[in-house]
Amino acid sequence: MNKVVQILALLGLLASLSACSNVIYRIDVPQGNYLEQKDIDKLRVDMTKEQVKFVLGSPVAENAFDNDTWHYFYSLKGGRGNNFEKQLIVEFKDNKLLDISGDFKKSEDFNTPLDI
């Protein structure tokens, strides 16, 4: 009978330890450039690369073969499995902002240069 109590106690202990794995804190792991729509709304066609860099920061990746395309990427790997990703592709021609694409919308003023 004493052996049965020990086995039950051991099983209870093992069950409580395995339940602890659900309460282990896992950190969120952010990577890349965190951008908000309000930052994207500041972009205007014909801005220089320096102006875009001032507004958005340096891109995560620049194409070594095409210096006129910049990639901004942000991902958040949540500790609880909730993942989040956003990207923005910025295209230039002759050192002037030509177009943007990706997970952000262009502002209504995007096609109005800053000089006007």
Image (cartoon, rainbow, N blue to C red):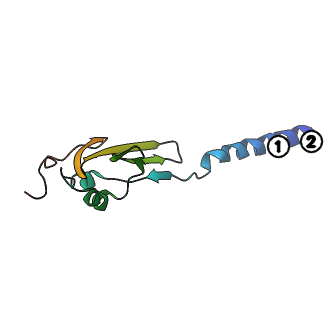
Instruction: Please name the amino acid that badge 2 sits on.
Output: Asn
Say what amino acid the circle numbered 1 marks.
Leu
Q: Is residue 86 left or right of residue 76?
A: left
Work out whether mark 1 precedes mark 2 in sequence or the reverse, and give the earlier one: 2
- Write down the residue under mark 1: 10
Residue lying furthest left in this view? 116
Which quadrant, please, contains the N terminus? top right
Quarter of the figure with residue 38: bottom left
Question: Which structural element holds mark 1?
Answer: helix
103 or 48: nearer the viewer: 48
Q: Are marks 1 and 2 in contact (CB under 8 Å)?
A: no
Q: Tell me residue 115's x, y (percent).
A: 10, 59
Is residue 51 positioned above or below 26 on the image? Answer: below
Residue 101 is situated, as x and y percent measured from the top left of the image, at: 28, 40
* Residue visible at 73% across and 41% down in the picture: 15
Q: Quick one: 24 or 116, which is closer to the camera?
A: 116
